[in-house]
Image: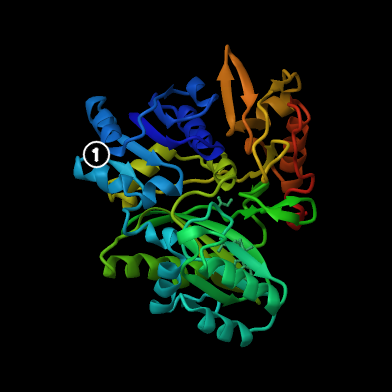
Amino acid sequence: MKILILGSGGREYSIARAIVNENEQHKLFFQPGNGATDALGTNINIKDYNDLADFAKENNIELTIVGPEAPLVDGVVDIFKAKGLNIFGPSKAAAQLEGSKVYMKNFLAKYNIPTARYIETESIEDAFKFADTLNAPIVVKADGLCGGKGVIIAQNHDEAKVAISEMLSGKSFGDAGLKVIVEEFLDGYELSMFAVCDGDDYILLQAAQDHKRLLDGDKGPNTGGMGAYAPTPLVDEELYQKVKDRVIRPTLDGMKKEGAPFEGVLFIGIMVVNGEPITLEFNVRFGDPECEILMPLMLSSVSDMFYKAATNRLSEIKVNFSSQYAVGVVMASENYPYKSSTPAEIIVDEVHHDEIRDNTHISYAGVSKEDGVLYADGGRVLVCVGLGDTIKQARDRAYLRCGQVHFMGKKIRTDIAYQAL
Ligand code: AMP
Ligand code: GLY
Protein backbone atom coordinates (compact mmCIF):
# COMPACT_ATOMS: atom_id res chain seq x y z
CA MET A 1 0.00 0.00 0.00
CA LYS A 2 1.03 3.61 -0.49
CA ILE A 3 0.50 5.37 2.85
CA LEU A 4 0.77 9.02 3.83
CA ILE A 5 1.40 9.89 7.49
CA LEU A 6 0.69 13.41 8.81
CA GLY A 7 2.85 14.64 11.67
CA SER A 8 6.48 14.91 12.71
CA GLY A 9 6.82 13.30 16.14
CA GLY A 10 7.88 10.06 17.73
CA ARG A 11 4.25 8.96 17.50
CA GLU A 12 4.29 9.14 13.71
CA TYR A 13 7.76 7.58 13.56
CA SER A 14 6.55 4.61 15.63
CA ILE A 15 3.50 4.05 13.40
CA ALA A 16 5.77 4.12 10.36
CA ARG A 17 8.27 1.79 11.99
CA ALA A 18 5.53 -0.75 12.73
CA ILE A 19 4.32 -0.56 9.11
CA VAL A 20 7.84 -0.93 7.69
CA ASN A 21 8.30 -4.07 9.81
CA GLU A 22 5.20 -5.76 8.37
CA ASN A 23 5.62 -8.69 5.98
CA GLU A 24 3.95 -6.84 3.16
CA GLN A 25 5.94 -4.07 1.47
CA HIS A 26 4.52 -0.56 1.73
CA LYS A 27 5.61 2.81 0.45
CA LEU A 28 5.46 5.63 2.99
CA PHE A 29 5.21 9.41 2.70
CA PHE A 30 5.39 11.89 5.55
CA GLN A 31 3.97 15.40 5.83
CA PRO A 32 6.23 16.86 7.08
CA GLY A 33 8.04 14.03 8.91
CA ASN A 34 11.32 14.61 10.72
CA GLY A 35 15.05 14.10 10.19
CA ALA A 36 14.71 10.36 10.79
CA THR A 37 11.46 9.50 8.98
CA ASP A 38 13.13 9.94 5.61
CA ALA A 39 14.94 6.67 6.32
CA LEU A 40 11.51 4.98 6.42
CA GLY A 41 9.94 6.74 3.45
CA THR A 42 9.77 10.12 1.72
CA ASN A 43 9.28 13.42 3.52
CA ILE A 44 7.17 15.90 1.58
CA ASN A 45 6.36 19.51 2.34
CA ILE A 46 2.80 20.43 1.38
CA LYS A 47 1.09 22.45 4.09
CA ASP A 48 -2.23 23.27 2.45
CA TYR A 49 -4.68 20.42 3.04
CA ASN A 50 -6.36 20.77 -0.37
CA ASP A 51 -2.99 20.57 -2.10
CA LEU A 52 -2.08 17.63 0.11
CA ALA A 53 -5.27 15.78 -0.87
CA ASP A 54 -4.45 16.46 -4.54
CA PHE A 55 -0.98 15.01 -3.94
CA ALA A 56 -2.58 11.91 -2.38
CA LYS A 57 -4.90 11.54 -5.39
CA GLU A 58 -2.18 12.01 -7.98
CA ASN A 59 0.14 9.57 -6.23
CA ASN A 60 -2.53 6.90 -5.64
CA ILE A 61 -2.14 7.03 -1.87
CA GLU A 62 -4.48 4.35 -0.55
CA LEU A 63 -4.45 5.39 3.11
CA THR A 64 -3.64 8.56 5.03
CA ILE A 65 -3.04 8.37 8.78
CA VAL A 66 -3.26 11.57 10.83
CA GLY A 67 -1.03 11.72 13.92
CA PRO A 68 -1.61 15.05 15.74
CA GLU A 69 -4.84 16.77 16.78
CA ALA A 70 -4.39 20.14 15.04
CA PRO A 71 -5.03 18.94 11.44
CA LEU A 72 -8.04 16.95 12.70
CA VAL A 73 -9.59 19.92 14.46
CA ASP A 74 -8.89 21.93 11.27
CA GLY A 75 -10.88 19.42 9.21
CA VAL A 76 -8.23 17.61 7.15
CA VAL A 77 -10.33 14.42 7.20
CA ASP A 78 -13.36 16.18 5.70
CA ILE A 79 -11.21 17.58 2.88
CA PHE A 80 -9.69 14.19 2.03
CA LYS A 81 -13.04 12.40 2.20
CA ALA A 82 -14.69 14.96 -0.07
CA LYS A 83 -12.11 13.93 -2.67
CA GLY A 84 -12.90 10.24 -2.18
CA LEU A 85 -9.69 9.41 -0.32
CA ASN A 86 -9.29 6.92 2.56
CA ILE A 87 -8.10 8.70 5.67
CA PHE A 88 -7.89 7.46 9.25
CA GLY A 89 -8.97 10.08 11.76
CA PRO A 90 -12.13 11.85 12.99
CA SER A 91 -14.04 14.49 11.04
CA LYS A 92 -13.83 18.11 12.14
CA ALA A 93 -17.16 17.70 13.94
CA ALA A 94 -16.04 14.57 15.82
CA ALA A 95 -12.64 16.11 16.64
CA GLN A 96 -14.53 18.56 18.87
CA LEU A 97 -14.23 15.87 21.54
CA GLU A 98 -10.67 17.14 21.90
CA GLY A 99 -10.95 20.58 20.32
CA SER A 100 -13.43 21.85 22.89
CA LYS A 101 -13.43 20.69 26.50
CA VAL A 102 -16.89 22.24 26.89
CA TYR A 103 -18.21 20.09 24.02
CA MET A 104 -16.56 17.03 25.55
CA LYS A 105 -17.88 17.61 29.08
CA ASN A 106 -21.40 18.35 27.84
CA PHE A 107 -21.27 15.22 25.66
CA LEU A 108 -20.22 13.10 28.66
CA ALA A 109 -23.01 14.56 30.77
CA LYS A 110 -25.65 14.10 28.05
CA TYR A 111 -24.80 10.41 27.58
CA ASN A 112 -24.32 9.64 31.29
CA ILE A 113 -20.63 8.81 30.99
CA PRO A 114 -19.03 9.25 34.43
CA THR A 115 -16.83 12.36 34.67
CA ALA A 116 -15.78 14.89 37.31
CA ARG A 117 -18.54 17.24 38.52
CA TYR A 118 -18.14 20.53 36.65
CA ILE A 119 -19.48 23.83 35.43
CA GLU A 120 -18.82 25.30 31.98
CA THR A 121 -19.10 29.04 31.83
CA GLU A 122 -17.96 32.35 30.40
CA SER A 123 -19.00 34.16 33.57
CA ILE A 124 -16.44 34.91 36.21
CA GLU A 125 -19.14 35.14 38.92
CA ASP A 126 -20.55 31.71 38.07
CA ALA A 127 -17.08 30.19 37.94
CA PHE A 128 -16.16 31.67 41.35
CA LYS A 129 -19.48 30.58 42.86
CA PHE A 130 -19.01 27.00 41.69
CA ALA A 131 -15.38 26.94 42.84
CA ASP A 132 -16.58 27.96 46.32
CA THR A 133 -18.70 24.80 46.46
CA LEU A 134 -15.64 22.56 45.89
CA ASN A 135 -12.89 21.44 48.22
CA ALA A 136 -9.30 22.23 47.16
CA PRO A 137 -7.51 21.27 45.00
CA ILE A 138 -9.70 22.68 42.24
CA VAL A 139 -9.28 21.99 38.55
CA VAL A 140 -9.61 24.85 36.04
CA LYS A 141 -9.50 24.10 32.30
CA ALA A 142 -9.48 26.33 29.24
CA ASP A 143 -12.02 25.25 26.61
CA GLY A 144 -9.81 25.19 23.51
CA LEU A 145 -6.51 23.61 22.44
CA CYS A 146 -3.59 24.97 24.50
CA GLY A 147 -0.83 22.56 23.54
CA GLY A 148 -1.33 20.52 26.68
CA LYS A 149 -1.01 23.51 29.03
CA GLY A 150 -4.66 24.48 29.48
CA VAL A 151 -5.30 22.59 32.72
CA ILE A 152 -4.50 24.18 36.08
CA ILE A 153 -4.70 22.16 39.30
CA ALA A 154 -5.15 24.97 41.83
CA GLN A 155 -4.03 24.09 45.35
CA ASN A 156 -6.47 26.49 47.03
CA HIS A 157 -9.44 28.73 46.25
CA ASP A 158 -7.32 31.85 45.71
CA GLU A 159 -5.16 30.11 43.15
CA ALA A 160 -8.27 28.79 41.40
CA LYS A 161 -9.73 32.30 41.20
CA VAL A 162 -6.53 33.68 39.72
CA ALA A 163 -6.52 30.90 37.10
CA ILE A 164 -10.20 31.54 36.28
CA SER A 165 -9.69 35.31 35.95
CA GLU A 166 -6.60 34.96 33.78
CA MET A 167 -8.30 32.49 31.45
CA LEU A 168 -11.58 34.36 31.09
CA SER A 169 -9.82 37.68 30.45
CA GLY A 170 -7.86 36.05 27.61
CA LYS A 171 -4.61 36.74 29.44
CA SER A 172 -3.36 33.17 29.81
CA PHE A 173 -4.60 31.37 26.69
CA GLY A 174 -6.16 33.99 24.40
CA ASP A 175 -9.42 32.90 22.77
CA ALA A 176 -8.95 29.28 23.90
CA GLY A 177 -9.64 30.40 27.50
CA LEU A 178 -12.69 32.60 26.98
CA LYS A 179 -14.81 29.69 28.19
CA VAL A 180 -13.69 27.60 31.13
CA ILE A 181 -14.48 24.38 32.91
CA VAL A 182 -14.19 24.38 36.68
CA GLU A 183 -14.32 20.89 38.12
CA GLU A 184 -13.78 18.76 41.18
CA PHE A 185 -10.38 17.17 41.69
CA LEU A 186 -10.37 13.39 41.38
CA ASP A 187 -7.96 11.46 43.53
CA GLY A 188 -6.93 8.12 42.07
CA TYR A 189 -4.55 6.67 39.52
CA GLU A 190 -4.47 7.72 35.90
CA LEU A 191 -4.56 5.52 32.83
CA SER A 192 -4.54 6.05 29.09
CA MET A 193 -6.71 3.81 26.94
CA PHE A 194 -6.88 3.84 23.17
CA ALA A 195 -9.75 2.57 21.05
CA VAL A 196 -9.26 2.39 17.30
CA CYS A 197 -12.77 3.19 15.99
CA ASP A 198 -14.54 3.03 12.63
CA GLY A 199 -17.73 4.86 13.64
CA ASP A 200 -19.55 1.67 14.70
CA ASP A 201 -16.97 -0.79 15.97
CA TYR A 202 -13.71 -0.51 17.82
CA ILE A 203 -10.57 -2.33 18.86
CA LEU A 204 -9.34 -1.55 22.34
CA LEU A 205 -5.55 -1.54 22.66
CA GLN A 206 -3.64 -2.29 25.85
CA ALA A 207 -3.90 0.20 28.68
CA ALA A 208 -0.86 2.41 29.19
CA GLN A 209 0.45 4.79 31.82
CA ASP A 210 2.07 8.05 30.87
CA HIS A 211 4.39 10.20 33.05
CA LYS A 212 3.33 13.79 32.46
CA ARG A 213 5.60 15.61 34.89
CA LEU A 214 9.13 16.59 33.93
CA LEU A 215 10.96 15.26 36.98
CA ASP A 216 11.33 12.00 38.90
CA GLY A 217 8.69 11.30 41.52
CA ASP A 218 6.07 13.15 39.40
CA LYS A 219 7.50 16.55 40.31
CA GLY A 220 8.03 19.64 38.21
CA PRO A 221 5.90 21.09 35.40
CA ASN A 222 3.55 19.16 33.12
CA THR A 223 4.97 18.06 29.78
CA GLY A 224 3.57 16.21 26.78
CA GLY A 225 4.80 13.04 28.50
CA MET A 226 8.26 11.93 29.62
CA GLY A 227 7.78 8.19 29.31
CA ALA A 228 5.16 5.46 29.29
CA TYR A 229 4.71 1.74 29.67
CA ALA A 230 2.13 -0.87 28.67
CA PRO A 231 0.27 -2.98 29.38
CA THR A 232 -0.22 -1.78 32.91
CA PRO A 233 -1.00 -4.39 35.58
CA LEU A 234 -3.23 -1.75 37.21
CA VAL A 235 -6.02 -2.80 34.83
CA ASP A 236 -7.82 -6.11 35.07
CA GLU A 237 -10.52 -7.62 32.84
CA GLU A 238 -13.25 -6.11 35.00
CA LEU A 239 -11.91 -2.59 34.53
CA TYR A 240 -11.46 -3.09 30.76
CA GLN A 241 -15.08 -4.24 30.62
CA LYS A 242 -16.28 -1.20 32.59
CA VAL A 243 -14.46 1.12 30.20
CA LYS A 244 -15.98 -0.65 27.21
CA ASP A 245 -19.53 -0.63 28.61
CA ARG A 246 -19.57 2.74 30.34
CA VAL A 247 -17.30 4.84 28.14
CA ILE A 248 -16.50 3.53 24.66
CA ARG A 249 -19.85 2.02 23.64
CA PRO A 250 -21.95 5.01 24.81
CA THR A 251 -19.44 7.37 23.15
CA LEU A 252 -19.66 5.66 19.76
CA ASP A 253 -23.46 5.44 19.99
CA GLY A 254 -23.71 9.03 21.23
CA MET A 255 -21.47 10.48 18.52
CA LYS A 256 -23.59 8.72 15.91
CA LYS A 257 -26.72 10.31 17.40
CA GLU A 258 -24.95 13.67 17.33
CA GLY A 259 -24.43 13.19 13.59
CA ALA A 260 -20.65 12.96 14.03
CA PRO A 261 -19.76 9.23 14.01
CA PHE A 262 -16.36 8.75 15.59
CA GLU A 263 -13.69 7.28 13.35
CA GLY A 264 -10.09 7.39 14.47
CA VAL A 265 -8.27 6.90 17.75
CA LEU A 266 -10.35 7.64 20.83
CA PHE A 267 -7.80 8.36 23.56
CA ILE A 268 -9.53 8.11 26.92
CA GLY A 269 -7.81 9.75 29.87
CA ILE A 270 -9.14 7.86 32.86
CA MET A 271 -8.87 8.38 36.59
CA VAL A 272 -9.61 5.21 38.50
CA VAL A 273 -11.29 6.18 41.74
CA ASN A 274 -12.22 3.33 44.11
CA GLY A 275 -12.09 0.86 41.21
CA GLU A 276 -14.40 2.94 39.00
CA PRO A 277 -13.18 4.47 35.72
CA ILE A 278 -14.00 8.18 35.55
CA THR A 279 -13.36 9.93 32.23
CA LEU A 280 -11.04 12.91 32.64
CA GLU A 281 -10.76 13.78 28.99
CA PHE A 282 -10.87 12.56 25.42
CA ASN A 283 -8.25 13.11 22.81
CA VAL A 284 -8.89 12.16 19.22
CA ARG A 285 -5.48 10.76 18.36
CA PHE A 286 -2.78 8.57 19.84
CA GLY A 287 -0.90 9.79 22.88
CA ASP A 288 2.76 10.54 22.53
CA PRO A 289 4.79 8.67 23.96
CA GLU A 290 2.04 6.05 24.47
CA CYS A 291 1.92 5.28 20.75
CA GLU A 292 5.64 4.51 20.75
CA ILE A 293 5.12 1.66 23.22
CA LEU A 294 1.79 0.37 21.88
CA MET A 295 2.94 -0.03 18.27
CA PRO A 296 5.74 -2.52 19.04
CA LEU A 297 3.25 -4.63 21.05
CA MET A 298 1.00 -5.14 18.01
CA LEU A 299 1.48 -8.55 16.39
CA SER A 300 -1.20 -7.95 13.75
CA SER A 301 -0.75 -5.58 10.83
CA VAL A 302 -1.32 -2.01 11.97
CA SER A 303 -1.66 -0.71 8.41
CA ASP A 304 -4.51 -3.18 7.89
CA MET A 305 -6.13 -2.13 11.17
CA PHE A 306 -6.02 1.56 10.20
CA TYR A 307 -7.20 0.75 6.66
CA LYS A 308 -10.14 -1.29 7.95
CA ALA A 309 -11.00 1.49 10.40
CA ALA A 310 -10.88 4.11 7.65
CA THR A 311 -13.19 2.01 5.45
CA ASN A 312 -15.65 1.06 8.21
CA ARG A 313 -14.73 -2.62 8.21
CA LEU A 314 -13.15 -3.13 11.63
CA SER A 315 -15.66 -5.89 12.44
CA GLU A 316 -13.87 -8.04 9.84
CA ILE A 317 -10.61 -8.29 11.75
CA LYS A 318 -9.20 -9.56 15.02
CA VAL A 319 -6.04 -8.04 16.42
CA ASN A 320 -3.35 -9.88 18.35
CA PHE A 321 -1.09 -8.30 20.94
CA SER A 322 2.31 -9.44 22.09
CA SER A 323 2.48 -10.99 25.56
CA GLN A 324 5.49 -8.78 26.31
CA TYR A 325 5.74 -5.39 28.02
CA ALA A 326 7.08 -2.19 26.52
CA VAL A 327 8.65 0.75 28.34
CA GLY A 328 9.48 4.02 26.59
CA VAL A 329 11.82 6.63 28.07
CA VAL A 330 11.67 10.09 26.51
CA MET A 331 14.94 11.91 25.96
CA ALA A 332 14.21 15.63 25.86
CA SER A 333 16.40 18.61 25.10
CA GLU A 334 17.96 20.84 27.71
CA ASN A 335 15.31 23.57 27.98
CA TYR A 336 12.19 21.43 27.54
CA PRO A 337 9.37 22.27 28.29
CA TYR A 338 10.22 25.93 28.86
CA LYS A 339 11.88 27.10 25.65
CA SER A 340 13.71 25.90 22.58
CA SER A 341 17.27 24.59 22.76
CA THR A 342 20.18 25.00 20.36
CA PRO A 343 20.45 22.08 17.95
CA ALA A 344 22.88 19.45 19.22
CA GLU A 345 24.43 16.55 17.33
CA ILE A 346 23.06 13.14 18.32
CA ILE A 347 25.54 10.31 18.68
CA VAL A 348 24.12 6.80 18.89
CA ASP A 349 26.65 4.17 19.92
CA GLU A 350 26.70 0.97 17.95
CA VAL A 351 24.88 -1.75 19.88
CA HIS A 352 27.09 -4.83 20.26
CA HIS A 353 25.03 -6.63 22.86
CA ASP A 354 22.51 -9.02 21.22
CA GLU A 355 19.98 -8.65 24.04
CA ILE A 356 19.89 -4.89 23.65
CA ARG A 357 19.95 -4.90 19.85
CA ASP A 358 17.05 -7.35 19.63
CA ASN A 359 14.87 -5.88 22.37
CA THR A 360 15.25 -2.12 22.11
CA HIS A 361 14.86 0.56 19.50
CA ILE A 362 14.65 4.32 19.16
CA SER A 363 11.61 6.30 17.98
CA TYR A 364 12.79 9.67 16.72
CA ALA A 365 10.79 12.85 17.31
CA GLY A 366 12.38 16.32 17.49
CA VAL A 367 15.28 15.65 15.14
CA SER A 368 16.59 17.14 11.92
CA LYS A 369 19.23 15.85 9.55
CA GLU A 370 22.03 17.74 7.88
CA ASP A 371 24.72 16.11 5.74
CA GLY A 372 23.68 12.74 7.10
CA VAL A 373 24.07 13.85 10.73
CA LEU A 374 21.08 13.81 13.12
CA TYR A 375 20.55 16.84 15.36
CA ALA A 376 18.40 17.17 18.46
CA ASP A 377 16.11 20.03 17.51
CA GLY A 378 14.53 20.82 20.86
CA GLY A 379 11.44 19.57 22.65
CA ARG A 380 11.14 15.85 23.06
CA VAL A 381 13.92 14.47 20.89
CA LEU A 382 13.48 10.71 20.90
CA VAL A 383 12.12 7.77 22.84
CA CYS A 384 14.19 4.74 23.82
CA VAL A 385 11.86 1.74 23.84
CA GLY A 386 12.63 -1.53 25.61
CA LEU A 387 10.66 -4.76 25.31
CA GLY A 388 10.74 -7.60 27.82
CA ASP A 389 8.87 -10.44 29.45
CA THR A 390 8.41 -8.36 32.59
CA ILE A 391 8.03 -4.62 33.07
CA LYS A 392 11.32 -4.57 34.94
CA GLN A 393 13.16 -6.29 32.11
CA ALA A 394 11.63 -3.93 29.54
CA ARG A 395 12.51 -0.95 31.71
CA ASP A 396 16.11 -2.08 32.28
CA ARG A 397 16.59 -2.60 28.56
CA ALA A 398 15.12 0.82 27.71
CA TYR A 399 17.53 2.48 30.15
CA LEU A 400 20.51 0.52 28.80
CA ARG A 401 19.63 1.90 25.37
CA CYS A 402 19.35 5.42 26.82
CA GLY A 403 22.96 5.09 27.96
CA GLN A 404 24.03 4.66 24.36
CA VAL A 405 22.46 7.84 23.03
CA HIS A 406 24.24 11.15 23.53
CA PHE A 407 23.59 14.83 22.83
CA MET A 408 24.35 18.03 24.71
CA GLY A 409 21.83 18.74 27.46
CA LYS A 410 19.92 15.44 27.12
CA LYS A 411 17.32 15.04 29.82
CA ILE A 412 15.45 11.92 30.98
CA ARG A 413 13.38 10.74 33.90
CA THR A 414 15.00 7.80 35.71
CA ASP A 415 11.81 6.33 37.20
CA ILE A 416 9.58 5.45 34.25
CA ALA A 417 7.13 2.63 35.11
CA TYR A 418 7.71 3.04 38.86
CA GLN A 419 3.99 2.64 39.57
CA ALA A 420 4.12 -0.91 38.24
CA LEU A 421 7.36 -2.08 39.90
P1 AMP B 1 -6.36 16.92 30.63
O1 AMP B 1 -5.71 17.76 29.57
O2 AMP B 1 -7.81 17.16 30.83
O3 AMP B 1 -5.97 15.47 30.54
O4 AMP B 1 -5.64 17.33 31.99
C1 AMP B 1 -4.27 17.20 32.14
C2 AMP B 1 -3.95 16.47 33.41
O5 AMP B 1 -4.52 17.16 34.52
C3 AMP B 1 -4.56 15.08 33.47
O6 AMP B 1 -3.77 14.14 32.82
C4 AMP B 1 -4.65 14.86 34.96
O7 AMP B 1 -3.39 14.46 35.47
C5 AMP B 1 -4.96 16.22 35.48
N1 AMP B 1 -6.42 16.39 35.67
C6 AMP B 1 -7.32 16.85 34.80
N2 AMP B 1 -8.56 16.87 35.33
C7 AMP B 1 -8.44 16.41 36.58
C8 AMP B 1 -9.37 16.18 37.65
N3 AMP B 1 -10.66 16.48 37.56
N4 AMP B 1 -8.88 15.68 38.81
C9 AMP B 1 -7.57 15.40 38.96
N5 AMP B 1 -6.65 15.59 37.99
C10 AMP B 1 -7.07 16.08 36.82
N1 GLY C 1 1.02 11.75 26.33
C1 GLY C 1 -0.19 12.44 26.42
C2 GLY C 1 -0.64 13.07 25.18
O1 GLY C 1 -0.16 12.76 24.10
O2 GLY C 1 -1.52 13.92 25.24
When asked about the image quadrant of residue 263, the answer is bottom left
Which residue does the image show at 29% across and 49% down from the upper left? 313
x and y, in percent, of residue 331 in the image: 69, 37
- The residue positioned farthest toward the top in the image shown: 371
Is 417 left, or right, of 179 in this rendering?
right
Judge by depth and name the residue closer to the eye, 278 or 367: 367
Compared with 188, 217 (above or below) is: above
Q: How is the image coloured?
A: rainbow
Please tell me how many numbered marks the rendered image carries: 1
x and y, in percent, of residue 329 in the image: 69, 41
Pick the quarter of the image with the C terminus.
Answer: bottom right
- The residue positioned farthest toward the left in the image shown: 83
**Amino acid, disc 1:** Leu
Judge by depth and name the residue closer to the eye, 122 or 416: 122
Secondary structure found at label 1: loop
Q: Which residue is mark 1?
A: 85
Which residue does the image show at 61% across and 68% down from the upper left? 271
Ligand 2 within 8 Å of disc 1? The answer is no
Which residue does the image show at 44% across and 30% down from the upper left? 32
Pick the quarter of the image with the N terminus.
Answer: top left
Is 140 left, or right, of 260 in this rendering?
right
Compared with 259, 69 (above or below) is: above
Neighbourhood count class around disc 1 (C-alpha, 10 Å): few under 14, some 14–19, many 20 upward? many
Ligand 1 is in which quadrant of the figure? bottom right
Judge by depth and name the residue closer to the eye, 341 or 85: 341
Can I make out residue 193 in this image?
A: yes
When asked about the image quadrant of residue 105, the answer is bottom left
Which residue does the image show at 35% across and 49% down from the upper left? 74
x and y, in percent, of residue 268 in the image: 51, 61
x and y, in percent, of residue 16 in the image: 47, 32
Judge by depth and name the residue closer to the eye, 179 or 232: 179
